[in-house]
Image (tube, rainbow, N blue to C red):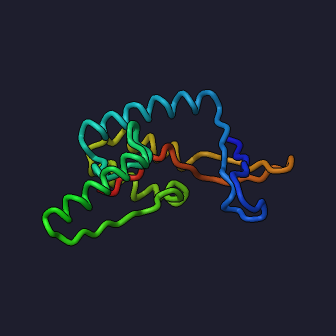
Amino acid sequence: GCITPVHKSGSKSYVNNYRPICSLSQFNKIFEGIIYDKMISFIETNNIFSKTQFGFRSGLSTEAAKIYFIDKIHTGQNKRHHTVEMFTDLSKVVDVTDHTILAKKLEHYGFKEKIVDLLKDFVSNRKYFVSTNGLNSTTKGSTLCPFFIIYK
């Protein structure tokens, strides 16, 4: 796929102000969609995601996270408990996912060996290039989808 950096906001000289947009082939888009649908169904059916993971999940939002957080605070106050919350920014986790650890986690949660092997091959043997100002460079590696964040 071709990765094109698209400016979000802020200074154009700061790399974190760009979002990498990847143009995939039609085959890859269809393949990823099929795999995603199958995997997310398995993950949701088997409650693999933590109930407090609001990012990268259908039907959940930052608004849902705020409501959950406020409810927890009020519940703790009403019971005279101390309340501690931890927030984790997982926005860059997709970029640094270790595919070996991911494969072991998928196996641990009951994904069939054939699917895990297919995904390992799919994410490890992909080629990307970055296109900026008409110049192309080559890089290797990717991840399938953000739902690979399984920290439960």
Task: Determine the residue located farthest toward the right in the rendered image.
Answer: 134
Position of residue 113 relative to residue 14, above or below, is above
Q: Residue at point 30% right, 38% down?
A: 44
Which quadrant, please, contains the N terminus? top right
Q: Nearer the viewer, residue 133 or 112?
A: 133
Which quadrant, please, contains the C terminus? bottom left
**60 on left or right of 32:** left
Residue 84, given in percent of the width and then of the height, sits at 28, 69
Residue 122, given in percent of the width and then of the height, sits at 52, 42
Q: Nearer the viewer, residue 83 or 38?
A: 83
Q: Residue at point 27% right, 48% down?
A: 109
Q: Residue at point 37% right, 51% down?
A: 65
Position of residue 8 relative to residue 37, above or below, is below
**39 on left or right of 51:** right
Q: Nearer the viewer, residue 64 or 23?
A: 64
Residue 118, given in percent of the width and then of the height, sits at 44, 40
Task: Determine the residue located farthest toward the front in the rendered image.
Answer: 78
Residue 53, given in percent of the width and then of the height, sits at 35, 51
